Image (cartoon, rainbow, N blue to C red):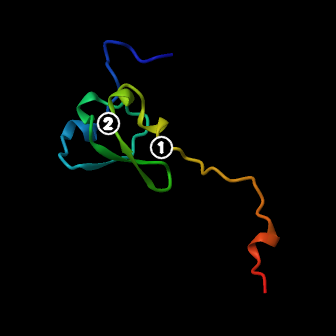
Amino acid sequence: MTRSLWKGPFLSSSFLKGSKKNHSKIWARKSVIPSFLIGQTVLVHNGNVFKKILITREKVGFKFGEFAFTRASMNKIKKNKTLTKKKK
């Protein structure tokens, strides 16, 4: 189910306090990106570290967690051992 329209989008209480820093830390990944953050860089916690995210107009309305991935991408290509050894 979606959130009721009369409630409005979910915002963490840290937004309502009005911190005026350029890099504000956000732990609530389920919060919706508000329009007053356009052009600012925020730090979103992915469970391990904070990831920098620049808020653009296209990202407004989405959730912060959609842009801070929690899993690292692994390369599945094996390195060729003959290329990495130095030739004498």
Left or right: where 15 falls relative to 64: left
Task: Give the residue type at disc 2.
Answer: Ser
- Looking at the image, the residue that sits furthest to the bottom is 88
Question: Which one is nearer the viewer's eye here, 72 or 17?
Answer: 72
| Left or right side of 77 for 38 | left
* Secondary element at tag 1: loop
Q: Which label number is shown at residue 6?
A: none
Q: At 17% from the left edge and 46% from the top edge, which residue is drawn?
A: 20
Indicate which label's residue lies in the foreground, 1 or 2. 1
Numbered label attached to residue 12: 2
Q: Is residue 21 above or below residue 84?
A: above
Residue 33 against residue 69 in the figure, above or below:
above
Q: Quadrant of residue 63?
A: top left
Q: Position of residue 73 (x, y in %)?
A: 63, 50
x then y, percent, for residue 85: 77, 77
Q: Residue at x 27, y 28 (%)?
A: 35
**Measured Cα–Cα span from mark 1 to mark 2:** 17 Å
Kind of residue at disc 1: Ala
Other-residue count near label 2 (Cα within 10 Å), few / some / many at <14 / 14–19 / ≥20: some
What residue does disc 1 label? 68
Q: Which of pointers 1 and 2 lies earlier in the amino acid sequence?
A: 2
Residue 17 percent location from the top left of the image: 19, 40
Q: Position of residue 6 (x, y in %)?
A: 31, 12
- Number of numbered callouts drawn: 2
The outermost residue toward the right is: 82
Residue at image position (48%, 35%) is: 66
Label 2 SS: loop
Q: Residue at x 25, y 38 (%)?
A: 15
